[in-house]
Amino acid sequence: DAGITQSPRHKVTETGTPVTLRCHQTENHRYMYWYRQDPGHGLRLIHYSYGVKDTDKGEVSDGYSVSRSKTEDFLLTLESATSSQTSVYFCAISGSTNEQFFGPGTRLTVL
Amino acid sequence: GNSVTQMEGPVTLSEEAFLTINCTYTATGYPSLFWYVQYPGEGLQLLLKATKADDKGSNKGFEATYRKETTSFHLEKGSVQVSDSAVYFCALAREGATNKLIFGTGTLLAVQP
């Protein structure tokens, strides 16, 4: 299995609070991604990174920001969480092939 | 634009039944195609892939053939087991697109003993 972890695995927070999710990889892969998974929508790309300090928006980026200061870490921040951001968040990594490897997910509940 | 369409679930089968989950795509150029599987409470795992027309991906008894003429990548298995119960996602990666994937909405498979 690809070495990819996410933290926390579960979080409950209140509307308006900031939240940061962490993705950590030990594979030295260039590309990292954040997705959200919601019923009826499959997985939707939030942001992705193609190198240290190189990031770009996905299809559902509003309300989210990311940072990648090291190859191994990719952080997703909700500056002011809203109930519509209640979801399961997955991090993925990809290297020289176009296969992606997924982390175990973070279940976020915004009350 | 690029998109993936999967058959709606849930699909409910008895053990040892034949499985087909339909997947069609819209894309420019020559995308790579994937099937991912998600078991309850887990992340997605790559099940199989195909990178060019007429390629057949296979793994764990599952197969899918890249059909460019029908823009399809249907997943099949000859005899399902209870342990195959999961959500299956079809996905495509465009050429030269930073390996970004576009997913279908997923199909829940429930296999009964």
Image (cartoon, grey):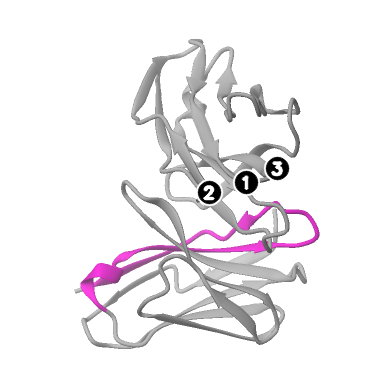
Question: Disc 3 sits on a residue from what chain?
Answer: B
Question: Residues at badges 1 and 2 in contact (C-beta under 8 Å)?
Answer: yes
**Which amino acid type corresponds to the residue marked 3 in the rendered image?**
Tyr
Q: Secondary structure at mark 1?
A: loop
Query: Which portion, as a residue range, is magenta?
Result: A82-110
Q: Residue sitting at 75 percent across and 35 percent down?
A: B52
Taking the image as shown, residue A82 lies to the left or right of residue B77, namely left
Question: Disc 1 sits on a residue from what chain?
Answer: B
The residue labelled by disc 1 is B28
| C-alpha span from label 1 to label 2 | 7 Å
Let me know if marks 1 and 2 both belong to one chain.
yes
Q: Determine the image quadrant of residue A96.
A: bottom right
Q: How many marks?
A: 3
The residue labelled by disc 2 is B2
Q: Position of residue B34 (x, y in %)?
A: 63, 40
| C-alpha span from label 1 to label 3 | 7 Å
Q: Nearer the viewer, residue A44 or B14?
A: A44
Taking the image as shown, residue B38 lies to the left or right of residue A3, namely left
Q: Position of residue A79 (x, y in %)?
A: 36, 87
Taking the image as shown, residue B88 lies to the left or right of residue B100, namely left
Q: Position of residue A101 (x, y in %)?
A: 64, 56
| C-alpha span from label 2 to label 3 | 11 Å
**Vertical comparison of A66 with B62: above or below:** below
**Vertical comparison of A92 with B49: above or below:** below
Q: Which of the numbered marks, if any, corresponds to residue B69?
A: none
**Which amino acid type corresponds to the residue marked 1 in the rendered image?**
Thr
Q: Determine the image quadrant of residue B30.
A: top right
The residue labelled by disc 3 is B30
Say which label, 2 or 3, has the lower sequence index.
2
